[in-house]
């Protein structure tokens, strides 16, 4: 019986002659189709050996089409973020404004004056496209853009303190995503780490007591991804700057998630701005472009003109160089700030500044839409997080759509399998979705996914 069933399976050559198989070849390649057919035939043989029956050639071709679809689908896909975490590191951090996306698309589809001075008719610098904007917005003498803030810190330490001592408080030896730590970055740069103070308390005299002939810099690493409370103290950046400059040393300020706007204006604790760091006397300030700034991934370095010029000459700058689409996107994002429209146009700030009343209206409409489909839900009080290593512990008031399913984890998995996937969170036995991070144009797709996933669970 088993041999008879095995003989019913067609050869790959026979399957390749079928019209539907030829259609697959036209949309992919002969090699990929053969590989998919071999895979489904192997699976069919195993099923027969386990006591099953042979499937028809049409079924085999259909299975091969499914295999091809899975193999050829991009693994990096858009998702709907219903978690309420605005700058979600795992979900791509900051969303980009329409103008930013358009600017990146325009330079991607045409030649551009990336490194060409149109007025002089000769080679120019790619950094001019963002430097003037950054300087106008922050008051810096000069600016440089690299691929991310970790790269920015590595470049600053490598170029300005290689082989020399850099003093930092023990309470600022932070670890960022992926397990990378400030001491590791410093070691890679060739600078010599000098720790001062205690984990919770560092005084200006601690810095003063270890400054020596080999000291090049005082470094402040802003604790943007965790907070310390209680019996805690540390000198201000202005105090560190005065000490450093009196001793002929540099001060570098790693802000992590830098901001141009005062977060306190939106119901959050105050996050140091780029402008404040420069006013406090920092010679070099660095931050990310894709967090609170709301632009594409980049590392922004601001500061004294002579130091930025020195950074430009270091070979590592070439290795950390950003491409034309990043510069175009960052320029478009910075223009939103210059025009005073960031809270309207930059998605991160639009989500942060969205009034609670707007969120209530949206989530109540969601509940009504699901009720029409026969699904029970509740609107409950909740909190949204800024995320992305920014403002740790800080949240914003919101309203959540709660689906109290028998198995919220199963529902969450089902939503992650929809197209587009919907990422929500489970809280107190319910699946909850936060309107703050769901874009208006995503609402219908999200609601359809919820209805589909719920019906699938009932079948």
Image: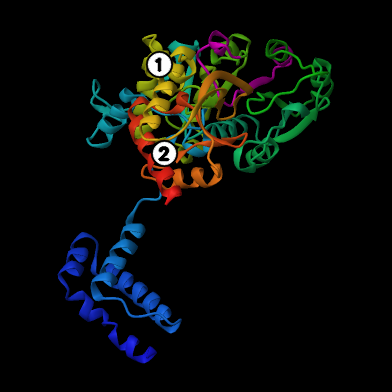
Mark with earlier residue (1, 2): 1
Element class at badge 2? helix
Please name which of the two marks, 1 or 2, marks the residue nearer to the observer.
2
Q: In front here: 406 or 274?
A: 406
Kindly indicate the quadrant of the structure image that contains residue 294: top left
Crowding at dot 2, Cα within 10 Å, few <14 / some 14-19 / many 20+, comes out as many
Residue at the image point whose x is 46% and y is 27% from the top: 437
Q: Nearer the viewer, residue 41 or 427?
A: 427
**Residue behind mark 2:** 450
Marks 1 and 2 sit apart, C-alpha to C-alpha, by 43 Å
Q: Which residues are magenta?
A: 243-268
- Does the segment drawn in magenta span residue 246? yes
Q: Is residue 9 magenta?
A: no
Q: Nearer the viewer, residue 9 or 119?
A: 9
**Which residue in the protein does label 1 denote?**
133
What residue sits 24% from the left and 24% below the top? 118
- Taking the image as drawn, is residue 406 in sight? yes
List the single residue furthest toward the left. 19
Please provide percent x and percent y for residue 431: 53, 36
Q: Residue 307: x and y, percent? A: 55, 22
- Name the residue nearer the viewer: 392 or 327: 392
Name the residue: 55% across, 13% down: 263
Q: Left or right: where does residue 105 sit relative to residue 224?
A: left
User: Alpha-carbon neighbours of circle 1 within 10 Å: few (<14), some, or many (≥20)?
Assistant: some
Classify 356 as above or below 423: above
Which type of secondary structure does the marked residue at label 1 adopt? helix
Question: Which x, y percent locates residue 228?
Answer: 74, 23
Please determine whether, in this image, residue 282 is positioned above or below residue 422. Answer: above
Q: Where residue 282 sits in the image (x, y, percent)?
A: 62, 16
């Amino acid at each position: 019986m088993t041999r008879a069933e095995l003989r019913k399976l067609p050869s790959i050559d026979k399957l390749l002659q079928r019209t539907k198989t030829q259609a697959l070849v036209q949309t992919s390649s002969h090699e990929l189709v053969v590989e998919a057919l071999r895979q489904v035939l192997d699976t069919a043989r195993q099923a027969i050996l386990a006591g099953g029956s042979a499937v028809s050639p049409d079924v085999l071709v259909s299975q091969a089409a499914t295999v091809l679809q899975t193999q050829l689908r991009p693994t990096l896909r858009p998702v709907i973020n219903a978690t309420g975490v605005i700058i979600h590191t795992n979900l791509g951090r900051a969303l980009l404004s329409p103008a930013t996306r358009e600017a990146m698309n325009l330079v991607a589809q045409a030649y551009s004056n990336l490194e060409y001075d149109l007025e002089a008719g000769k080679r120019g610098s790619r950094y001019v496209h963002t430097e003037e904007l950054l300087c106008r917005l922050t008051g810096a003498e000069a600016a440089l853009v690299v691929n991310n803030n970790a790269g920015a810190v590595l470049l600053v330490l490598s170029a300005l303190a290689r082989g020399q001592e850099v003093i930092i408080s023990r309470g600022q030896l932070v670890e960022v995503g992926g397990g990378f730590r400030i001491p590791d970055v410093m070691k890679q740069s060739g600078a010599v780490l000098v720790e001062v103070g205690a984990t919770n308390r560092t005084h200006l005299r601690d810095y003063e007591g270890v400054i020596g002939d080999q000291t090049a810099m005082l470094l402040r690493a802003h604790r943007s991804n965790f907070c310390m409370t209680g019996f805690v103290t540390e000198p201000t950046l202005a105090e560190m700057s005065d000490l450093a400059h009196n001793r002929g040393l540099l001060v570098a300020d790693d802000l992590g998630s830098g901001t141009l706007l005062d977060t306190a204006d939106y119901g959050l604790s105050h996050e140091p701005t780029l402008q404040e760091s420069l006013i406090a006397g920092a010679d070099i300030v660095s931050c990310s472009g894709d967090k609170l700034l709301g632009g594409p991934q980049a590392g922004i370095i601001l500061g004294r003109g002579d130091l930025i010029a020195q950074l430009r000459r270091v070979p590592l700058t070439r290795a950390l160089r950003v491409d034309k689409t990043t510069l175009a996107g960052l320029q478009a994002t910075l223009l939103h700030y210059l025009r005073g429209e960031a809270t309207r146009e930059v998605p991160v700030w639009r989500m942060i500044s969205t009034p609670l009343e707007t969120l209530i209206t949206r989530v109540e409409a969601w509940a009504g839409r699901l009720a029409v489909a026969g699904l029970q839900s509740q609107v409950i009080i909740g909190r949204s997080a800024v995320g992305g290593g920014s403002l740790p512990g800080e949240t914003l008031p919101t309203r959540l759509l709660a689906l109290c399913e028998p198995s919220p984890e199963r529902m969450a998995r089902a939503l992650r399998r929809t197209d587009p996937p919907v990422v929500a969170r489970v809280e107190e036995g319910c699946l909850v979705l936060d309107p703050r991070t769901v874009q208006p144009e995503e609402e219908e797709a999200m609601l359809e996914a919820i209805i589909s996933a719920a019906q699938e669970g009932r079948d």
